[in-house]
Amino acid sequence: MYNPFTLKEKTIFISGASSGIGKATAIECSKMGAKLCITGRNNERLNNTFSQLEGNNHLQIVADLQTDEGINSVVETLPLLDGIVHSAGIIKTVPFQFSGKEIINDVMGINFYSPAILSQLLLKKKKLKKAASIVFISSVSGVSCSSLGNSVYSASKGAINGLVKGMALDLAPKMIRVNTVNPGMIDTSLFAEGILTQEQLKDDVKHYPLKRYGKPKEVAFMVIFLLSDASSWVTGSTFLIDGGYTLL
Amino acid sequence: MDLKLFVDMFAELFEETEKSKFKPSTKFRDIDEWSSFIGLSVIAMVDEKFNVKMTGGDIRESITIEDLFNIVLKKQ
């Protein structure tokens, strides 16, 4: 059957695959025929994702990408890749005047430094095939807008968007494409967990013209497009997926 | 830790409300300027000044400034 979005014969690495967008992306990629290499910090949750992958010959690596040891162990273990999805990320909702060194280092560390260094090391160790695709899960935050208490999170995502433009240029000679997916609020997202009350979430969802938050699967479908050969002429681009949020 | 000092630190988080409006018995949600963003500032201030982790739930369960102070005392 004709399918321009197939990921058959492709080996894809996904960070942050224990939950949320990373988990959904891993599962959907496996349904599209990809061989997955997934990583996350939590053994139990990563294994849960692993057990839901379709097909065989997938790989799981428990690692903390906030540490050099974690990054190095992942780089050494990974096979030759057709794609990378940087989905690991954290949020710390703290008003800017209280966002000191520790918060800035933690959030920039996992959201910006880790995926940047991981990408650089994988290239240095020649673990990316020609015409591979790198996708960063960014956000509407820091690119199109921000939200109360999330200035450092916004900074980390803004940094990703800047990095991707430069990476896309530098890696074009290898035909490696680099793009971002920028979601609005997603169900079971970092934002919602414990920060907002049910009432606040109900109020917030009214800002979405499509009247709901996004699903992790919907972000995964965008990522699949970017990993597939269908997007062979797409690089340095930012893909907004926000239910119309930034229109208002 | 002093209750009066805590009330003063709480008051510093507000920009437009007179200091005289802040007492231990003040119901903080009745202050016009109160918002969930200031709630985030309370959590951050308590973490920074007292090394205590307050949660959104702690704020929701409290009514007066003294209620907040008592939670900080309990968690210290």
Image (cartoon, coloured by chain):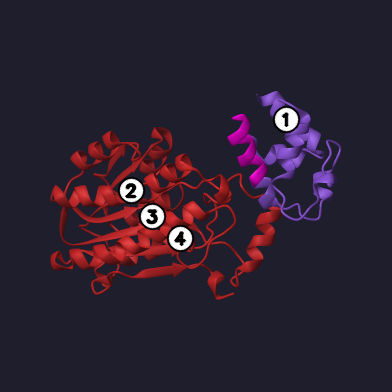
Chain colours: A red, B purple
Q: Nearer the observer, disc 1 or disc 4?
A: 1
Between marks 1 and 4, how big is the CA–CA gap? Answer: 35 Å
Look at label 4 and name its amino acid. Answer: Ser
Count of marks, rendered view = 4
Look at label 1 and name its amino acid. Answer: Ile
Residue underneath mark 1: B71
Look at label 3 and name its amino acid. Answer: Thr
Residue underneath mark 4: A139
Residue underneath mark 3: A25
Number of other residues with Cα within 10 Å of mark 1, as a class: few under 14, some 14 to 19, many 20 or more: some
* Sequence-first disc among 2 and 3: 3
Q: Which residues are magenta?
A: B41-51
Give percent across and percent down for residue A42: 41, 35
* Sequence-first disc among 2 and 4: 2
Say left or right for A55 vs A148.
left
Q: Nearer the observer, disc 1 or disc 3?
A: 1
Residue underneath mark 2: A113
Image marks 2 and 3: residues in contact by CB distance under 8 Å: no
Host chain of mark 2 = A
Give percent across and percent down for residue B37: 66, 52
Same chain for marks 2 and 3? Answer: yes
